[in-house]
Image (cartoon, rainbow, N blue to C red):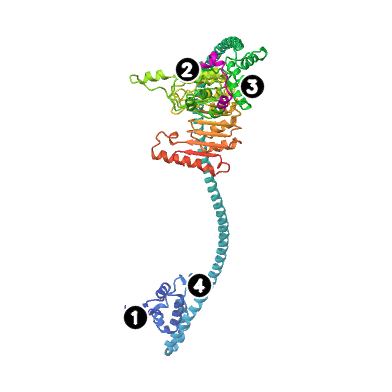
């Protein structure tokens, strides 16, 4: 059967879509078109297609039941104006018992159809239209009832959903608040965890550091125990040495006591001989005659027992002649008589002055004036000039070799012998200062080896020096021996301690024979009045370990009243320097030569023990740190001058390398920077290699 022959067509699709029954059409409209189309279709079919229903009724449709199945129809919320949203809801289909309605209508109107056969078609159309309308009305009523029921159900469901949504929203809000709180707590927990992790790491680092310090402390404790054992051994050795020194001192004291006894006997014998010589001189003078008789008269005056002193010497004869001449001369000659009176103390006149004819000679006033004038001039001449002046004439010789002229003796840069010093000792009985500097020995023989030359010249001037020191005795106040290698050894200081007990300033510097503890002890036992001591070894020293901390400790014990001190050498350490500073409380000038580095620790130890009155600090070839200088300046309130003399060889073994020069320049710049500090600009003086 063609599609155009089917009774029902789709109002939307047109003639192309026709259906066999209404159920098929309704199903098509349900799934392909909206409910509004179905409503329009039903209404149009009830009017326009009423005639098409008749064959269905006439052909036996009336005998059978025709109904629409009960199905849900789609219905949008906008069409019903009830749903709150735009989602579609489904309403149940309503059964339309069209067959029953048509059969009832046909049976009730059957008689009318038979009687009025002419109007059969019209009646059938009206019946069909009324049946359709009735079915439509009944289906619409059922549809509305069911729609209202569904709307009520939807309202209840909507209220229920709103309540559920409100509860869910409240629950979600509470959960969100709880979530935020938990998030904050989690963040705080994370921060706390990071902090605890950091603290744990710090504690682990500290534990590691403490463990390392414990290990270092254990090692230091072991080293200190070993040092303690070594120190105890060293202490035992030192105690033995102290015992030996005590024994040596006792023996020295015994020998000194014997020497004093012998010296006293010698002096008494000498005085007796002097008395006998004076008596003989008086006898000779009383027997001699002069034209005016004045000589004998004056000799008799000088020979009176009451006017003689027991300590006069053989030179009293010459003193008597000067007294006689003074009585006959003018007042201008009194100066020379006083100068002539200084001849006491061992001055030996020449051979011709000892003869009786020379004794009886009268000195004219003109000669006395000349000698007085020469004396005023010769006191300013050096030693070489005095020796040459003695060769001019008799008067010049007399004045040039007078002991009063030889009070200061300076021998330097010369080649001398011990015999010359012995000769010089005849005129140096009143010597106050003796300086021997840079002396040279005799020349080396052609066939003489170096070892033989050094052995023969070692200490070759000590015999002459002993004669000088013995001649001057306690008159010597200043002794300086420097740069005389191999000619004068440390025995020179031992000789000075024996003959010159009144020494106040001593300087001994040698590169071959530096002073040791024994010599310093002997010098301290004999010369207690020394206030200036310079005993630093020269550099380079052949015995660098000879001058050590023991020497510094001995110096502090022997001369606690030292004012100026110069020490040095690689053997000087913090222990000796601290002991020296503690014992020499009046020290004003301190010079350290070629001492190991002076750092802040050494400076603090020295200033803690003493140096409160220090006025001048000289560091020669001694490395020093800026912090040490700052400590000296702050601790020594009376400090007026700090002199630092350094060279690159004092810091580095290879001074020619560029790196050593760079580091040395940095050190010098740090020392120079101290001058910018308050109080340092005027007292700090830095003298370095390559620095103007």
Which label's residue is closer to the chain start, 3 or 2? Answer: 3
Q: Nearer the viewer, mark 4 or mark 1?
A: 4
Alpha carbons under labels 4 and 2: distance apart: 146 Å
Alpha carbons under labels 3 and 1: distance apart: 197 Å
On the image, the x and y values in percent for residue 661 come to 42, 39
Using the image, tell me which numbered label, if any, was put on residue 327: 3
Q: Nearer the viewer, mark 2 or mark 1?
A: 2
Going by the image, does 528 lie left or right of 440?
right
Judged from the image, the secondary structure of the residue bearing numbered disc 2 is helix
Which label's residue is closer to the chain start, 4 or 2? Answer: 4
Q: In the rendered image of this protein, does residue 539 appear above or below residue 42?
A: above
Alpha carbons under labels 2 and 1: distance apart: 170 Å
Q: Which residue is mark 1?
A: 5
Q: In the rendered image of this protein, does residue 504 appear above or below residue 119?
A: above
Judged from the image, the secondary structure of the residue bearing numbered disc 1 is helix
Judged from the image, the secondary structure of the residue bearing numbered disc 3 is helix
Q: Residues within 10 Å of mark 2 (few under 14, many from 20)?
A: some
Q: Which residues are magenta?
A: 352-372
Q: Which residue is mark 2?
A: 463
Going by the image, does 498 lie left or right of 49?
right
**Residue 478 in sight from this viewpoint:** no
Q: Nearer the viewer, mark 3 or mark 2?
A: 3
Give the camera-side residue of 606 and 146.
Answer: 606
Q: Residues within 10 Å of mark 4 (few under 14, many from 20)?
A: some
Judged from the image, the secondary structure of the residue bearing numbered disc 4 is helix
Residue at the far front: name it: 291
Q: Which residue is mark 4?
A: 77
Q: Nearer the viewer, mark 3 or mark 1?
A: 3
């Amino acid at each position: 059967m063609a599609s155009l022959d089917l009774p029902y067509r789709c109002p939307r699709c047109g003639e192309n879509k026709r259906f066999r029954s209404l159920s098929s059409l309704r199903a098509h409209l349900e799934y392909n078109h909206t409910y509004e189309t179905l409503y329009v279709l039903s209404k149009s079919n009830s009017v326009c297609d009423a005639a098409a229903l008749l064959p269905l009724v006439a052909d036996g449709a009336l005998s059978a039941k025709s109904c629409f199945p009960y199905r849900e129809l789609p219905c949008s919320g906008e069409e019903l104006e009830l749903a709150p949203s735009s989602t579609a809801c489904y309403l149940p289909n309503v059964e339309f018992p069209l067959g029953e309605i048509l059969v009832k209508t046909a049976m009730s109107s059957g008689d009318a159809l038979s009687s009025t056969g002419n109007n059969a078609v019209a009646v059938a159309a009206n019946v069909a239209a009324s049946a359709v309308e009735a079915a439509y009305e009944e289906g619409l009523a059922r549809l509305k009832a069911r729609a209202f029921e569904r709307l009520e159900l939807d309202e209840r469901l909507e209220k229920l959903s709103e309540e559920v949504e409100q509860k869910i929203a409240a629950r979600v809000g509470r959960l969100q608040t709880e979530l935020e709180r938990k998030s904050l707590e989690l963040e705080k927990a994370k921060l706390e965890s990071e902090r605890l992790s950091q603290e744990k790491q710090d504690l682990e680092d500290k534990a590691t550091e403490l463990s390392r310090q414990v290990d270092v402390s254990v090692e230091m404790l072991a080293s200190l125990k070993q040092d303690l054992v070594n120190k105890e051994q060293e202490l035992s050795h030192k105690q033995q040495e102290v015992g030996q020194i005590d024994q040596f001192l006792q023996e020295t004291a015994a020998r000194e006591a014997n020497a004093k006894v012998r010296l006293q006997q010698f002096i008494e014998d000498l005085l007796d001989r002097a008395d006998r010589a004076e008596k003989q001189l008086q006898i000779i003078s009383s027997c001699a005659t002069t034209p005016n008789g004045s000589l004998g008269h004056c000799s008799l005056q000088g020979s009176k027992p009451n006017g003689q002193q027991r300590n006069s010497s053989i030179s009293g004869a010459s003193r008597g002649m000067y007294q006689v001449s003074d009585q006959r001369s003018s007042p201008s000659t009194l100066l020379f008589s006083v100068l002539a009176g200084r001849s006491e103390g061992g001055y030996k006149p020449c051979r011709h002055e000892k003869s009786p004819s020379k004794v009886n000679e009268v000195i004219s006033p003109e000669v006395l004036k000349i000698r007085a004038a020469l004396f005023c001039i010769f006191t300013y001449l050096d030693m070489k000039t005095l020796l040459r002046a003695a060769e001019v004439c008799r008067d010049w010789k007399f004045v040039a070799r007078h002991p009063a002229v030889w009070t200061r003796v300076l021998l330097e840069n010369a080649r001398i012998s011990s015999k010359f010093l012995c000769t010089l000792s005849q005129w140096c009985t009143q010597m106050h200062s003796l300086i021997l500097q840079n002396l040279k020995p005799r020349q080396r023989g052609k066939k003489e080896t170096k070892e033989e030359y050094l052995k023969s010249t070692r200490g070759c001037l000590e015999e002459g020096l002993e004669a000088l020191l013995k001649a001057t005795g306690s008159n010597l106040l200043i002794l300086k021996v420097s740069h005389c290698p191999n000619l004068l050894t440390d025995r020179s200081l031992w000789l000075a301690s024996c003959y010159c007990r009144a020494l106040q300033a001593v300087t001994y510097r040698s590169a071959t024979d530096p002073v040791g503890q024994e010599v310093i002890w002997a010098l301290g036992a004999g010369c207690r009045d020394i206030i200036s001591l310079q005993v630093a070894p020269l550099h380079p020293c052949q015995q660098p370990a000879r001058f050590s901390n023991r020497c510094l400790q001995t110096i502090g014990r022997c001369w606690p009243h030292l004012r100026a001190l110069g020490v040095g050498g690689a053997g000087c350490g913090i222990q000796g320097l601290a002991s020296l500073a503690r014992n020499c409380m009046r020290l004003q000038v301190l010079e350290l030569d070629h001492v190991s580095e002076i750092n802040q620790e050494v400076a603090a130890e020295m200033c803690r023990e003493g140096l409160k009155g220090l006025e001048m600090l000289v560091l020669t070839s001694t490395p020093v740190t800026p912090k040490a200088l700052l400590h000296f300046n702050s601790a020594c309130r009376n400090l007026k001058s700090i002199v630092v003399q350094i060279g690159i060889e004092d810091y580095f073994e290879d001074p020619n390398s560029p790196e050593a020069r760079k580091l040395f320049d940095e050190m010098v710049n740090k020392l120079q920077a101290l001058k910018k500090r308050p109080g340092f600009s005027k007292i700090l003086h830095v003298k370095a290699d390559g620095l103007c």
